[in-house]
Amino acid sequence: MKSLKTLNKYFLRYKTKLLLGIVFILCSNSAQFYIPIILKISIDDLITTITYEKFIVYSLLIVIVAIIG
């Protein structure tokens, strides 16, 4: 516990950066969670009627979510 107390001054100095990093990690993980869901929806939709516009929209949506994540 004593070594943890010595680290507290460093954690407090960079508190905002640490919290911002945690928020970005949570956003990245949640974005990666949605890729399989989007893929399922796109496959189900494209099986019924395949159009070039739908294909482009779903492809761009998956790429955008992957870039965010």
Image: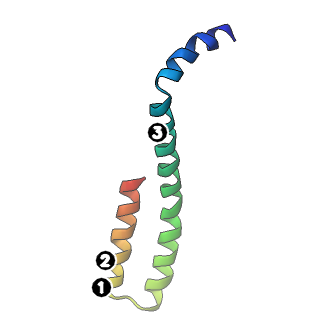
Q: Looking at the picture, how far across and down is residue 26, in whole percent? A: 53, 47
Q: Is residue 54 left or right of residue 43?
A: left
- The quarter of the image holding the N terminus is top right
Looking at the image, how many numbered discs can be counted on the residues?
A: 3
Upstream in the sequence, badge 2 or badge 3? 3
| Rendered view: 12 above or below 6 | below
Question: Which structural element holds mark 2?
Answer: helix
The residue nearer to you, when weighing 31 against 17, is: 17
* Image position, residue 15 (x, y; %): 50, 28
Quote the CA–CA distance across marks 2 and 3. 33 Å
**Relative to 28, is 3 on the left or the right?**
right
Residue at 53% over, 55% down: 30
Image disc number at residue 20: 3
Is the C-beta separation of discs 2 and 3 under 8 Å?
no
Q: Which residue is mark 1?
A: 52
Question: Is the residue 27 above or below the residue 55 in the image?
Answer: above
Name the kind of residue labelled 3 in the image. Answer: Leu
Q: Are marks 1 and 2 in contact (CB under 8 Å)?
A: yes
Instruction: Work out whether mark 1 precedes mark 3 in sequence or the reverse, and give the earlier one.
Output: 3
Q: Residue at x 48, y 70 (%)?
A: 38
Amino acid type indicated by mark 2 = Ile
Closer to the camera, 4 or 14?
14
Residue under circle 2? Answer: 56
Give yes or no for contact between labels 1 and 3 (Cβ–Cβ under 8 Å).
Answer: no
Mark 1: secondary structure: helix
User: Residue placed farthest to the bottom in the image?
Assistant: 49
Please give the name of the residue rendered at 36% of the width and 62% of the height, measured from the top-left corner: 64
Q: Is residue 49 above or below residue 20?
A: below
Q: Is residue 58 above or below residue 21?
A: below
